[in-house]
Amino acid sequence: MTDAVIAQREAWKARETLAEQLIPLIGRLYRDHGVVTSIHGRRLINQSPIGVIKAHRYAHHVTGAVLPLERTREVLDALLTLDPGSASLDIARLLGDYDAHGAGRSLAAYLGEVVGAAPAPTGDPRGTDVVLYGFGRIGRLLARILIAHAGNGAGLHLRAIVVRKGGENDIVKRASLLRRDSVHGPFEGTITVDAEANTILANGTLIQVIYADDPAAIDYTAYGIDNAIVVDNTGRWRDEEGLAQHLRSTGVARVLLTAPGKGALPNIVHGINHETITADQRIVTAASCTTNAITPVLKVLNDEYGIVHGHVETVHSFTNDQNLIDNFHKGDRRGRSAALNMVITETGAAKAVAKALPVLEGKLTGNAIRVPTPDVSMAILNLRLARPTTRDEVNTFLRQASLHSNLRQQIDYIESPEVVSTDFIGSHRAGIVDGLATISTGDNLVVYVWYDNEFGYSSQVVRVLETMAGTHPAVVPARVGE
């Protein structure tokens, strides 16, 4: 090998060594303090050394330079001396702020000021019990996220799942579906089943499996569960009367629906109207995956350019309510094989946007096409704006919104001529703007938004859950508009 090749290899080994040294520090901050660290939104917890290096490499796409691992080590060391509270902490943004505004102060002093100013959680310091009513696609992904977010135990506690018994080996099959997923891959960790006690132990989280047909007749306190939030992900009940059945069960404090609610129920899109949630709202809904994907993008565009009118066309992966092969279905066209056809169907997402963002009331229409893919969908926003713009201008604006706005946990942005739908499986953002697909002609704008309609939506549901429980971590640094 040449000297140049050897030098490159040695440099890589040195980076791997540094990354390996960062992992226990990242873990201590998470387990002992509830701090989730990231690099421009790319999370560092539960990453391999290669994953840590890739996250630092991503900074190059934002600032033009790779973030040195040594600087992250400085931040982590300083944070561990501060005893920080629960927070979602972006190391790259903190260092950028420090370089720009921290003159005359040590890094530790600056971090102490910024982290100390972050609002503390308002919920029960012992955490909040969570029950998943239903254990389908969204239920199992919520379980994965809640287990991974167990942290220092001061947040959300997944205590139980409620299902109808499907057979003698029901719990083994439920655990197997949690352990293996055809779309999202294997569960990261260990799972143990106790068939006699009807429990699943996943990475130290003990989950009681409760078999019931009546949501109003369960005594959760018999399992040590109290003041719980029940997450109904069955979709069976969508109105206040149906969902209120959960509140008649002993040990239930509140209910969250993982679908658009009917009637006057509040439809919450985290990042848009989550601050309207009040303690006396006992039933809250998390809207739909499509509403969560498009509302943040529509908000920033409306704030900057004004939206006169628009049409939302959703290209959506098939879902479990469609037929695998042609058979009777009460819905129009949905009886035809989901695996073989594109199926035109209706979507309420365009109208639902107005529930979270009233300024767009009456300005949007919508339709949907179900396609033969199992996950990741796309929303095409065809908008007429109040003032003209250019493709480059709007793309720069949306990229900045994904990095620096109050909606940076919801909006992501990408420019790549090679990405396809499967590249977005596992994204924890509500939607990802595909900048290369943007079309702008005067006051007419077309924006393409990818979204993982399973995992990205589930991440939004967890954020709503955290808000209801008063455990949503502060986003640090909070300063925007850079």
Image (cartoon, helix red, strand yellow):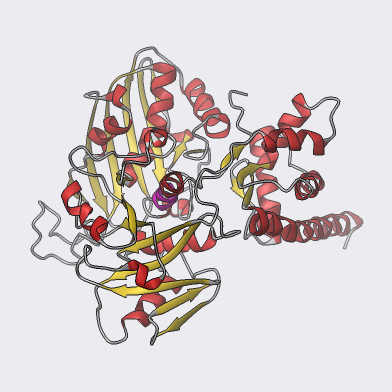
Residue at 51%, 23% in the rendered image: 392
Residue at 18%, 63% in the rendered image: 323
Asked whether 265 or 183 is in front, the reply is 265
Q: Position of residue 25 (x, y in %)?
A: 74, 56
Q: Residue furthest top?
A: 387
- Whether residue 180 is visible here, answered yes or no, is no
- Whether residue 246 is visible here, answered yes or no, is yes
**Image-quadrant location for residue 388:** top left
Q: Residue furthest right?
A: 3
The magenta span reads 456-462
Q: Is residue 154 above or below residue 281?
A: below
Residue at 24%, 23% in the rendered image: 363
Placement of the N terminus among the 4 image quadrants: bottom right
Count all numbered tags in the image, as a single digit: 0
Q: Position of residue 337 (x, y in %)?
A: 18, 62
Is residue 326 shown in magenta? no
As drawn, is 296 to the left or to the right of 95?
left
Magenta: main secondary structure: helix
Placement of the C terminus among the 4 image quadrants: top right
Q: Position of residue 233 (x, y in %)?
A: 30, 58
Q: Is residue 87 above or below residue 131?
A: above
Q: Position of residue 293 (x, y in %)?
A: 38, 40
As drawn, is 217 to the left or to the right of 462?
left
Asked whether 52 or 279 is in front, the reply is 279
As drawn, is 22 to the left or to the right of 337?
right
As drawn, is 369 to the left or to the right of 92?
left
Asked whether 261 or 244 is in front, the reply is 244
